[in-house]
Image (cartoon, rainbow, N blue to C red):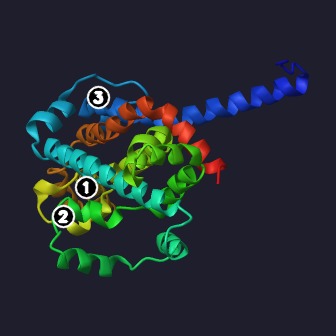
């Protein structure tokens, strides 16, 4: 392949690389600032001396959240349980449903397709869903955060596009060897569709990990709170004190400030909530990129 070395081509390459560097910088700089604050001394943070590097490096904030505050490790474990359970159920039900809908001879297939896509445009709303969860006895449990969101219409469509473009010859060959539909799916189709499975698993997992609103509605026990809900309460506590001070309630703001979580602890908790996704993504990046391309271009 001959590389174009013309002036216009080189200028285009320069502009593309410059834009990519700019995007990387505006993405990484805030993250580096957050990490620096989490490793800085609270006094230096109050003086505004923290930039991209920690000021007066110490690990007090991490010792606080990992060893002195029992709520944060417990909430981290709760988030892991919710994410793993929810993602496994999401992938299972989305995959099975998409495989069934990819079969043109499925009875009432157009009706089921319409039923699957309808939630993208219309939902019952928060109140009916809350009443349903309460009547089913799932309040204050992991099922309240996973069962109502078992299947996403968008990721169902992505998997459906995978299975629709799957070579029919392979399925027919597996059936000639005595495999049923379920065996064909598990032994033939899924191993060759791992790009799509990993892609939807990543997005489902990130959604569960970052979710706090559902937990705020359905979780009653503080011991069952996920990490994101704990982090939200920490941030809101600080925001409320600032609002009281700006409104002239200095005495009340001062009393609340005495009970505030130090800013270094707030940012350390934020870093802990970010790390799992950053660690997981490099291992599944190759599947993720391939899955997005196939799921979006084929149809």
Which one is earlier in the sequence, the residue at label 1 or at label 2? 2
Q: Please tell me whether residue 20 is drawn above or below residue 208 in the rendered image.
A: above
Label 2 secondary element: loop
Which one is earlier in the sequence, the residue at label 3 or at label 1? 3
Label 3 secondary element: loop
Residue of label 3: 40
Closer to the observer: label 1 or label 2?
2
Which one is earlier in the sequence, the residue at label 3 or at label 2? 3
Residue 255 position in % (x across, y down)? 15, 57
The reply, left or right, for residue 26 in relation to residue 230 is: right
Instruction: Give the number of the disc on residue 219.
Output: 2
Q: For marks 1 and 2, give the CA distance.
A: 10 Å
Q: Please tell me whether residue 114 is drawn above or below residue 6 in the rendered image.
A: below
Q: For marks 3 and 2, give the CA distance.
A: 33 Å
Residue of label 1: 229
How crowded pointer 1 is (Cα within 10 Å; few <14, some 14-19, many 20+) is rated as many
Instruction: Give the number of the disc on residue 193.
Output: none
Q: Please tell me whether residue 101 is drawn above or below residue 50 in the rendered image.
A: below
How crowded pointer 2 is (Cα within 10 Å; few <14, some 14-19, many 20+) is rated as many
């Amino acid at each position: 392949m001959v590389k174009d070395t013309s002036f216009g081509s080189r200028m285009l390459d320069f502009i593309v690389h410059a834009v990519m560097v700019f995007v990387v910088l505006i993405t990484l700089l805030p993250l580096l600032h957050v990490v620096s604050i989490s490793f800085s001394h609270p006094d230096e943070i109050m003086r505004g001396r923290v930039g991209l590097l920690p000021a007066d490096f110490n690990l007090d904030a991490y010792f606080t959240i990992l060893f002195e505050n029992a709520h944060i490790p417990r909430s981290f474990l709760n988030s892991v349980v919710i994410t793993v359970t929810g993602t496994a159920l999401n992938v299972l039900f989305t995959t099975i449903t998409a495989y069934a809908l990819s079969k043109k001879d499925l009875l009432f297939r157009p009706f089921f397709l319409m039923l699957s896509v309808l939630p993208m445009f219309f939902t019952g709303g928060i109140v009916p869903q809350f009443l349903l969860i309460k009547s089913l006895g799932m309040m204050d449990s992991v099922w309240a955060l996973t069962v109502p969101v078992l299947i996403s219409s968008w990721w169902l469509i992505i998997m459906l596009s995978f299975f629709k473009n799957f070579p029919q010859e392979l399925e027919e060959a597996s059936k000639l060897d005595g495999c049923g539909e379920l065996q064909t799916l598990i032994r033939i189709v899924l191993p060759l569709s791992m790009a799509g499975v990993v892609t939807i698993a990543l997005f489902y997992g990130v959604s569960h990990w970052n979710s706090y609103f559902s937990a705020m509605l359905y979780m009653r026990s503080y011991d069952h709170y996920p990490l994101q809900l704990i982090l939200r309460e920490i941030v809101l506590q600080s925001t409320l004190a600032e609002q009281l001070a700006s409104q002239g309630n200095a005495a009340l703001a001062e009393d609340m400030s005495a009970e505030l979580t130090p800013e270094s602890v707030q940012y350390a908790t934020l870093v802990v909530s970010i790390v799992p996704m950053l660690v997981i993504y490099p291992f599944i990046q190759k599947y993720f990129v391939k899955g997005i391309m196939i799921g979006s271009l084929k149809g």
